[in-house]
Amino acid sequence: MQVSSLNEVKIYSLSAGRSLPEWLSDRKKRALQKKDVDIRRRIELIQDFEMPTVSTKIKVSRDGQYIMAVGTYKPRIRCFDTYQLSQKFERCLDSEVVTFEILSDDYSKIVFLQCGRFVEFHSQHGHYYKTRIPKFGRDFSYHYPSCDLYFVGASSEVYRLNLEQGRFLNSLQTDAAESNACDINPVHFLFAMGTAEGKVECWDPRTRNRVGLLDCALSSVTADTEIDGLPSVSALKFDGALNMAVGTSTGQVLLYDLRSSNPLIVKDHHYGLPIKSIQFQHQLDLIISADCRIIKMWNKDTGKIFTSMEPEYGINDVCLYPNSGMLMTANEAPKMSIYYIPVLGPAPKWCSFLDNLTEELEENPETTVYDDYKFVTRQDLENLGLAHLIGSSLLRAYMHGFFMDIRLYHKAKMMANPFAYEEYRREKIRQKIEETRAQRVQLKKLPKVNKELALKLIEEEGEEQQVTRKRKQKNLPSLLKDDRFKVMFENPDFQVDEQSEEFRLLNPLVSKISEKRKRKLKLLEELETQEQEEEEEPEGKASDAESSESSDDEKGWVEEVRKQRKLLRQEEKVKRQERFKEDQQTSLKPQFFEIKEGEEFRSFKDSAKKQKLMKKTLGDRLKLEEKLGTLNVCDTTVGSKQATFKLKK
């Protein structure tokens, strides 16, 4: 059982067992099952709760006893009995199922809308009847008072099939070119259909007239949303008598009150993917909307996110088990997922043991099997002296590194650095001492690195605080307290080099200001040595000098730059003279070169020519030999080439 948490909402994945690495062999998995109690007691809530390849739709019967799912390949329906926690039956179909509906309280009456325009009826014993509709269907709804099936699809008409009379009735003529989704209100039986143009048409089945029209495409586009084309309606769901949720093909969910043409809330999934399913959770007033990538639960009054789930595989359908916290999904994978969220409600009666299990898991947090393995890179192996194990059974290649047994890693680390524990222990003791020191009354201590820069920042922070107090503004965060710049005052590599040419030319007045700061630094060091409880800042001449220095004009700045340039030239001249003296003192010794056997030394120029010649291509070398006369290339009668050459002496 895998546990995830978002916004402090625990989500238990019941279909996935404890996380096992894919590269483990079956023998090792069996060994882990013998050793580890948690792996041996993995929860398989419903036996064989899966499809051969992909599951497309999943629904629960009204009595809650049967879970039905359709999928491929081959096209089939599987019915699972929750009282037996196993599969009840499986039936194969002639073509893939677009959607299906359970008409009875149990599995005795089912209607399937299939890809080839077929509508197939199943009874308790199996296949009962099959008919076709004129155009390809995409969705249908059942009107209980009149026993009518309303089919929408690739047509402007809504086809009506009466199950009591066993014949098609007059179609509803709409203004839409195509329709994608439909639903019937469970209270007053208003029929609503979502069109490809992004509109929702509402019809009264009693009078067969259109009573309302909503432009969802226009309402879904807000200032924050970015869309590529015209949004079409991809999902539709009624909640009670007055509320209706509409999902668009661009990833927005709109919540409407039927008395208004403007949406109450527009929720964007921010993935730009069509909304596949919309469910209502009445206990917490939540809307559960899903696209193929994420399931989001959000408050229908405020739109605030409650929690969300991102399964490993693409989502095709979502089903909420009635009056419980159980959620089931049909995925782009053989295994159908089951999630249990205790916050949404209790576990169903047929798996009430889940409540006790989740309480125990909260008391004892779970660890993964990856704790027995250590991920190391090639550089880590070289540092440990284990590079020769690459390719052996002790290392398992994975991504940019390897998995190795954690015990082997600890042994190798102890051998490579036997004093690592002592260093770790010293570091921990030092950290504990620093923690206790932090509780004492502290002086204003400066960091070891970049002390002058830190003092400058402290002074600027004090000035800013005075300004913000006068203007009643919020204080900005200090650079010294910011974790992003912490290394700049700890690592000596970030020490500012004040003697460098760039620093001296860009900061010509730093020398004067730094003298004042050096005085302050000396005073602070004296105060630290005396361990005084309060720190007094030097005032008087220093502050007057600061005000006078800050009021220097541009002329003084230019003079300072000139002085710095003169100093830099003088320093460069002294360095040149020192280098010249060193060159005079050094005595050059002759170098000897050894010639290979079988070669004759002529001059250094010949060796340079040889190196240049070797770098050239074969074609260039042949052309050069032809010019010198040592090579002659000519065509023969057959079509091949003949080359004659002279050997060098």
Image (cartoon, helix red, strand yellow):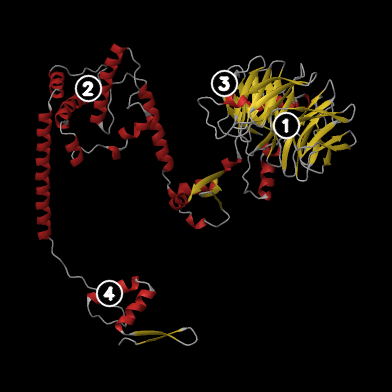
Residue at position x 53%, y 24% in the image = 222
Q: Is residue 332 above or below residue 223?
A: below
Instruction: Please provide percent x and percent y for residue 135.
Output: 77, 37
Q: Are marks 1 and 2 in contact (CB under 8 Å)?
A: no
- Of the two numbered discs 2 and 3 on the same chain, state the one appearing first in sequence: 3
Q: Amino acid at mark 2?
A: Leu
Q: Quadrant of residue 96?
A: top right
Distance between the Cα atoms at labels 1 and 2? 88 Å
Q: Are marks 3 and 4 in contact (CB under 8 Å)?
A: no
Query: Which residue is labeled 1 in the image?
Result: 156
Q: Quadrant of residue 159?
A: top right
Distance between the Cα atoms at labels 4 and 1? 84 Å
State which mark lies toward you, 2 or 3: 3
Q: Are marks 4 and 1 in contact (CB under 8 Å)?
A: no
State which mark lies toward you, 2 or 4: 4
- Of the two numbered discs 1 and 2 on the same chain, state the one appearing first in sequence: 1
Distance between the Cα atoms at labels 3 and 4? 78 Å
Categorize mark 3 by other alpha carbons within 10 Å: few (<14), some (14-19), many (20+): few
Taking the image as shown, residue 348 lies to the left or right of residue 627, namely right
Q: Is residue 569 above or below residue 299?
A: below
Query: Which residue is labeled 4 in the image?
Result: 609
- The quarter of the image holding the C terminus is bottom left
- The quarter of the image holding the N terminus is top right
